[in-house]
Image: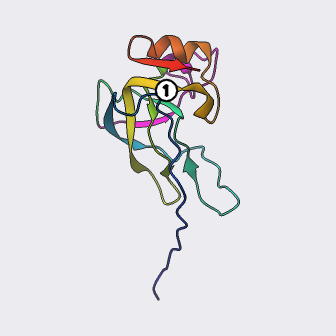
Amino acid sequence: MSKFVTTTYGNKREILKFPDHYVTLGVMVDDTGITANADSKKIVSAGTIVGGGVLTDNTKKVSKKNTQGGASGSEGAAVDAEGVLLNDVDVTYGPASGAMIVHGFIALDKLPEAPVAEAQTALKGRILFLK
């Protein structure tokens, strides 16, 4: 018995303010805690603030890091933010590869949710969020 997967493609969401000035790092995006959408797909959206120690250990997975008030190392803690996902990543069938922006200019109005103050502080000097 074969398994067939149908994929619908749409336009890419552009989150960069200046698309010719950014640096990315290849990462594995964790599927833990991601809820399936109406199409039964687990999608981590472009513009999601992520981290997980990947800047010091490239074998680690990144996960969402945009919760204010969390202590370092706690789930979702914005203080552990290391970058921003460049493109949507489909983690329906488990962790998947993606690109994390580690330097660049991000358009605030294009993000799925505004970065909390702690995330902006953690990314300061590498990523600038612009209106």
Note whether residue 62 is visible.
yes
* Colouring rule applied to residues: rainbow
Q: Secondary structure at mark 1?
A: strand
Within the magenta stretch, is there residue 76? yes
Q: Nearer the viewer, residue 10 or 84?
A: 10
Q: Is residue 59 above or below residue 9?
A: above
Which quarter of the rendered picture does the C terminus lie within? Answer: top right
Q: Residue at x 63, y 23 (%)?
A: 67
Q: Residues within 10 Å of mark 1 (few under 14, many from 20)?
A: many
Within the magenta stretch, is there residue 80? no
Q: Nearer the viewer, residue 64 or 46?
A: 46
Q: In the figure, residue 82 lies in which quadrant?
A: top left
Note whether residue 72 is visible.
no
Looking at the magenta stretch, what is its main secondary structure? loop
Q: In the figure, residue 125 lies in which quadrant?
A: top left
Q: Is residue 116 left or right of residue 82?
A: right
Q: In the rendering, at what x and y percent does residue 73 appear?
A: 49, 21
Q: Residue at x 49, y 60 (%)?
A: 93
Number of numbered callouts drawn? 1
Q: In the figure, residue 109 lies in which quadrant?
A: top right
Q: Is residue 34 above or below residue 117?
A: below
The amino acid marked with disc number 1 is Ile
Q: Residue at x 43, y 27 (%)?
A: 83
Residue furthest to the right in view is 38
Q: In the rendering, at what x and y percent does residue 80 appear?
A: 48, 20
Q: In the rendering, at what x and y percent does residue 54 appear?
A: 34, 30
Question: Which residue is the site of mark 1?
Answer: 106
Q: Magenta residues? A: 59-79
Q: Residue at x 62, y 36 (%)?
A: 112
